[in-house]
Amino acid sequence: MKNVLILGATSDMAQAIAKKYAAEGWSLTLAALEKELLEPIAGDLQVRNEIAVQTLEFDATDFSNHRKLYESLSTKPDVVIAAFGYMSDQDEVRNDLEDIKRTIDINFTGMASVLSVVAEDFEQRGSGAIAAISSVAGDRGRQSNYIYGSAKAGLSAFLSGLRNRLAPKGIHVMTVKPGFARTKMTENLELPAALTASPEQIADAVFQGLEKKRSVVYTLWMWRFIMLIIKHIPEPIFKKMKM
Ligand SMILES: NC(=O)c1ccc[n+]([C@@H]2O[C@H](COP(=O)([O-])OP(=O)(O)OC[C@H]3O[C@@H](n4cnc5c(N)ncnc54)[C@H](OP(=O)(O)O)[C@@H]3O)[C@@H](O)[C@H]2O)c1
């Protein structure tokens, strides 16, 4: 039975991804900040799908512990999906250095730290696949969300380089850019329905994308074209757009 390790497994997207992999018959290792929140999720998946589910505590910002944690896994994963993230309201905290650091630590440094440990193991074993949830917010810095956006831009660049380094070794790395998604992270935002994906749509896109070895997945597909246009808006015009 193949195993998937999901980091940030209490996230709404991660829970849908876990359900999808469980339904496909994979065993699961679920890792999240608060292990006790994982227990009911794990129990439900175990009973419904008759699969093995392990849980463990994982803090993306506890960088020095990432190697020890990964080495402690009794089952080494075939696939790792990193779904943790943090976004605050930039208007409220843009001068709060603690919050800026937290945003970068979770969305960029934490991802780079734990995925480097995973990549080293996959490289030694000569197989494996990684998917991480980045964001279209990293495709171009916007005045309303450039702190989160810059951390995600760093993550997208990290994943691109890792993908190209590991491709000749048979290891696949996929970047996921969900566009808007209906989750806890966005529950206070008004999102346009036509451009907003459900966690289940994202889970399908992640599963299918990894099966087909896609490099960068935009969910929903129209986000690829939206971002293409946004990236090409000349800077003098972009400055005047309240985005
Ligand atoms: N929702 C969107 O529109 C959207 C769009 C693009 C990209 N994304 C990205 O999608 C991913 C999943 O987010 P979501 O939308 O599913 O929102 P979510 O439900 O709020 O998930 C965020 C998850 O990150 C976890 N987390 C926060 N700090 C952590 C830390 N230090 N260590 C480990 N885990 C930590 C949270 O755990 P706790 O709940 O225990 O704090 C939570 O499970 C994130 O990377 C997010 O940036 C979301």
Image (cartoon, rainbow, N blue to C red):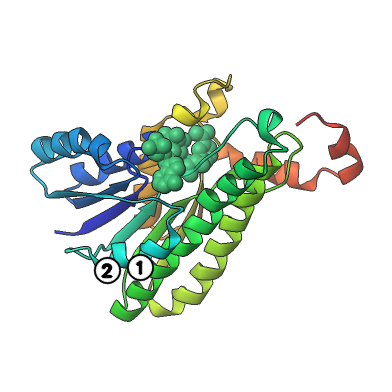
| Residue in the foreground of this view, choosing between 51 and 192 | 51
Where's the N terminus, which quadrant?
bottom left
Residue type marked 2: Glu
Q: Who's the residue at 70% across and 42% down the image? A: 146
Q: Viewed as shown, does residue 53 lie left or right of 69?
A: left
Image quadrant assignment for residue 41? top left
Residue 74 locus on image (x, y percent): 17, 64
Residue 65 locus on image (x, y percent): 37, 62
Marks 2/1 in contact by CB < 8 Å: the verdict is: yes
| Residue in the foreground of this view, choosing between 112 and 238 | 112
Residue 173 locus on image (x, y percent): 44, 63
Q: Is residue 1 above or below residue 86?
A: below
Residue type marked 1: Arg
Local crowd size for mark 1, using a 10 Å CA cut-off: few (<14), some (14–19), many (≥20): some
Q: Secondary structure at mark 1?
A: helix
| Residue in the foreground of this view, choosing between 182 and 117 | 117
Which residue was labeled with disc 2?
71
Mark 2–mark 1 Cα distance, whole angstroms, equals 6 Å
Q: Secondary structure at mark 2?
A: helix
Residue 172 locus on image (x, y percent): 41, 66
Residue 178 appears in the figure: no
Q: Is residue 70 above or below residue 57?
A: below
Which residue was labeled with disc 1?
67
| Residue in the foreground of this view, choosing between 55 and 20 | 55
Q: Who's the residue at 12% across and 41% down the image? A: 46
